[in-house]
Amino acid sequence: MTTRVCKTFSFDAAHHLPKHDGKCRRPHGHTYTVQVVCIGPVIDSGPKQGMVVDFGDVKDAYTDRIHSRVDHQDLNVVLYGHVDPTTAENIAHWILGEMRSALGLDVVESVRVYETPTCYAEAS
């Protein structure tokens, strides 16, 4: 049986969209919310018995690969060459790739990135 688990994180960062024809062209900031969804069978033995993935492993991967790079940063600077433009859609795809590299392609199903409480992009 397949089970999904989700861990939620947040970070604060600035960015701008240089080619946008509206207010997002100017530098501004967000408190981003990130949801990492993992999928798989529940492990039936060993130290992680009863889990799909250890939430601590998800937290460690996120902290090392994402949070340490983006929190209280200008995303146009720190993600230059990796994410262009720094839309929620592109940030979600970048985080998905980083988390899959850390935890495995078959473990991380999707990533949601909220720029505001009512607007998100999802990569899977």
Image: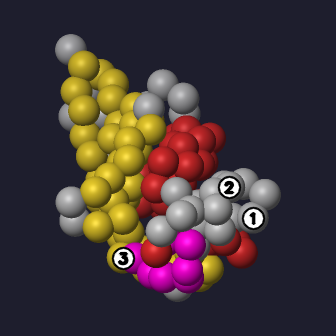
Q: Nearer the viewer, residue 43 or 82?
A: 82
Residue under label 2 = 84
Q: Residue 37 placed where, x, y %?
A: 33, 41
Disc 2 and disc 1 in contact, CB within 8 angstroms: yes
Q: Are marks 3 and 1 in contact (CB under 8 Å)?
A: no
- Specify few, some or many for label 3: CA neighbours under 10 Å numbering under 14, 14-19, or 20 or more: some
Q: Quadrant of residue 34?
A: bottom left
Q: Amino acid at mark 2?
A: Asp
Instruction: Name the residue tied to disc 3.
Output: 31
The residue under label 3 is which amino acid type? Thr
Give the amino acid type for the residue marked by disc 1 in the picture. Tyr
**Left or right for 50, reference 45:** left
Quadrant of res 25: bottom right
Q: In the rendering, at what x and y percent does residue 13 appear?
A: 50, 79
Residue 100's disc is none
* Percent coordinates x, y for residue 103 in the rendering: 52, 41
Q: CA distance from mark 3 to mark 1?
A: 20 Å
Q: What kind of element bears circle 3?
A: strand
The earlier-in-sequence mark between 3 and 1 is: 3
In this rendering, does residue 5 appear at all? Answer: yes
**Bounds of the magenta span?**
24-30
Whether label 3 touches label 2, CB < 8 Å = no
